Image (tube, rainbow, N blue to C red):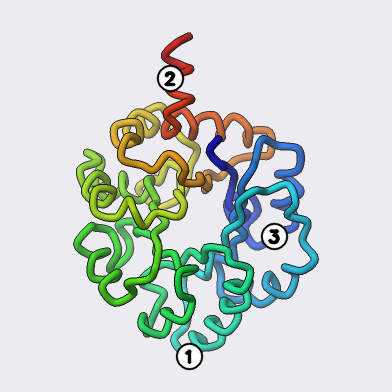
Amino acid sequence: MRYVGFSTGALALGDFQAALQMLAGKNCSAVELSALRQEELGPLVAQLDHLDLSNFRYVSFHAPSAIEPVFEADVLRLLEQVALREWPIIVHPDAMSHPREWARLGQHLCIENMDKRKPIGQTASDLDCIFETLPNAFFCFDIGHARQVDPTMSEASAILQSFRDRIRQLHVSEVNTQSKHDCLSLESIIAFQRVSHLVPVDAPIILESRVEESEINEEIQSALAALDPATQLAVAGD
């Protein structure tokens, strides 16, 4: 059974407690704790010992999406506390001013491919350079970012063929032209299905779709229809 769940930042930006409450009683076996803004990192790390995460089989942590260079060392010190929990730590490559310093997170460092706004990290070639610098890092494949960069899914296919063995988790959503994360549409589901055979079947799915609490379970089913072979076979057999 594939682990699937949500990013707290998608459900309640800046309020991880509210997001965890929204996930209570839902069909979620995974969660990504998100400190998407730099000022959210310290308070979230300080609360980790007090969070009830017992319902989740898989937990990851999203580092701030933008980090001021002067605070990079402080951010890394906080993330080292997260690494002690052996959770994957999702990092945007353009947030790292001194990439080699991030090697201290070891195999807990998980680089994410980027949307079209960002200066690096969108292509297989970009990622190859990043992993040359950080050879022990793993990979968070954001399939919505890949589709926004190249709607034909050719770049997504190239990324998966090159780095599927590094994948620790998936980010799944529809990413619109303004680089915002929306609910999955039929078009995005069909596009994702075209490369789903290249995605490791055991890679946890973390949804970043901006949904209401009442839409959580439905969005999970849409993600499974897009990427989970067992779900696709069940639907085909109906």
- Three-letter code, disc 2: Leu
In primary-sequence order, the first of circles 2 and 3 is: 3
Direction from residue 204 to residue 11 in the image, left or right: right
- Three-letter code, disc 3: Asp
Residue at position x 30%, y 64% in the image: 121
Seen from the viewer's position, the closer of residues 82 and 35 is 82
In the image, is residue 73 above or below residue 65?
Answer: below
Of circles 2 and 1, the one toward us is: 2
Determine the secondary structure under disc 1.
helix
Q: CA distance from mark 1 to mark 3?
A: 25 Å
Determine the secondary structure under disc 2.
helix
Provide residue 216's location: percent of width, then percent of height: 63, 36
* Residue that sits furthest to the top in the current view: 238
> Which residue corresponds to mark 1?
70
Residue at position x 23%, y 70% in the image: 129
Q: CA distance from mark 2 to mark 3?
A: 37 Å
Tell me the number on the disc at residue 233. Answer: 2
Mark 2 packing: few (<14 Cα in 10 Å), some, or many (20+)?
few
Contact between labelled residues 3 and 2, with CB atoms less than 8 Å apart: no
Provide residue 168's location: percent of width, then percent of height: 45, 55
Provide residue 85's location: percent of width, then percent of height: 63, 68
> Which residue corresponds to mark 3?
15
Q: Quadrant of the N terminus?
A: top right
In primary-sequence order, the first of circles 2 and 1 is: 1
Residue at position x 49%, y 34% in the image: 223
Direction from residue 145 to residue 129 in the image, left or right: left
- Three-letter code, disc 1: Val
